[in-house]
Amino acid sequence: MKPKILITLLFAAIVVGGLIFAYREMSKERDAEKHREAPVVAESKIAKNEKGETILTLDAEAQQRIQIKTAPLIATNATQEIRVYGRVLDPSNLVEMMTEVESTRVTAGTSRQELERVKNLAENVSAKSLQAGEAAARRDGLATQAAQMKFQLAWGKTISDRKDLAQFAGTLVSLEQLLIRLELPPGEKLSAVPTSALIASLSGKENLPAQFLELAPKVDEQTQGSAFIFLTDGKSNTLAPGALVTGSLQNGVPTQGYVIPASAIVYHEGKPWIFVRTDAKNFVRRAIDLKFATENGWLVSGLSPKNEIVVNGAQMLLSEEGKSQLRTGD
């Protein structure tokens, strides 16, 4: 056989071999792609219990494949804490309004004394003088009431009605004590009125305990959040009126529930859910009420200490539930 023919046949054999190899590799790739697109759990199925909750059934192999981990619930009492911002209040306005109230009280007292003097001399004074005295006493009394209400609207009843107001104002002016206004973000609420707070400057160097005085009588026009007034010791001289601060609010009322780690919570249709293991193969998707965040997760109520929840793989279970519904046409 001629050399040219041998070379041609050899080249053709190489080409055919390459095509066969390429075809086999493409077949392997298609099989791998099909495997990747296949459901993680081919044998999973869903059902509904008597409460209408979704039950997802997975065998042990499937649970191991998607690394399902569960943990028992432990009852706890947690106190809500929330980080907020605020500022040290300037007491100068408080002093001005307090002085105005006292000034009107003195004027009203003088008017009443003058009216009593005129009444005692009724036989020797004209009716016009008596009417003028009564009008002055009434006017000055109303001025006192107006000044007191204005003070209360600005600073709240707890502060404006203090018996030791003058002494209290003196401690604020000398910075022995500081009034702190802390504000919640708009729309956020506490489950109870806070009893105390920890105050720090924006640098975070302070950690001052503060006593709750009252709800702020006014909402800030810009922030629009609920606000609280606290009193703290100013002897450290690290904060001054107008300074911005951060605060950790504590309501002091322990709430009973279960702390759920964030990894256990999934969101479906805009609501939070967890998966509860009911037996070796079955998991129930259960709606939960998130009370508030804690250091280790969320405080949740409405569960049973007998429940064991999925703490790893919950999102995979939700995804598998959706795939099962598509496969069954539900």
Image (cartoon, grey):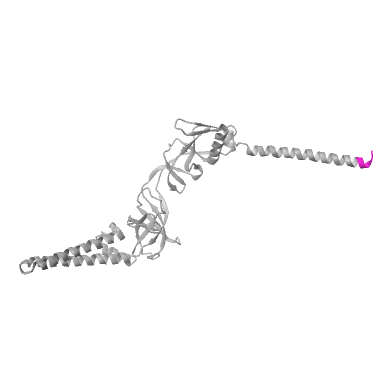
User: Can residue 117 be seen at all in this image of the molecule?
Assistant: no
Q: Quick one: which residue is furthest to the left in this view?
A: 123
Quadrant in which the N terminus is drawn: top right
Residue at image position (58%, 33%) is 327
| Residue 3 drawn in magenta | yes
User: Can residue 98 be seen at all in this image of the molecule?
Assistant: yes
Q: Quick one: which residue is furthest to the top in this view?
A: 50
Is residue 46 or residue 312 the one in the foreground?
Answer: 46
Q: Quick one: which residue is furthest to the bottom in this view?
A: 124
Residue 41 position, x and y percent, is 59, 35
Residue at image position (42%, 55%) is 84
In the drawing, does residue 177 fall left or right of residue 38?
left
Q: Would you say the magenta stretch is mainly helix, strand or loop? A: helix
Residue at image position (14%, 64%) is 134
- Residues in magenta, as a range: 1-5
Is residue 124 or residue 113 the one in the foreground?
Answer: 124
| Residue 83 drawn in magenta | no
Residue 309 position, x and y percent, is 49, 38
Residue 100 position, x and y percent, is 25, 66
126 up-or-down from 322: above or below:
below
Residue at image position (32%, 67%) is 92
In the drawing, does residue 73 fall left or right of residue 8?
left
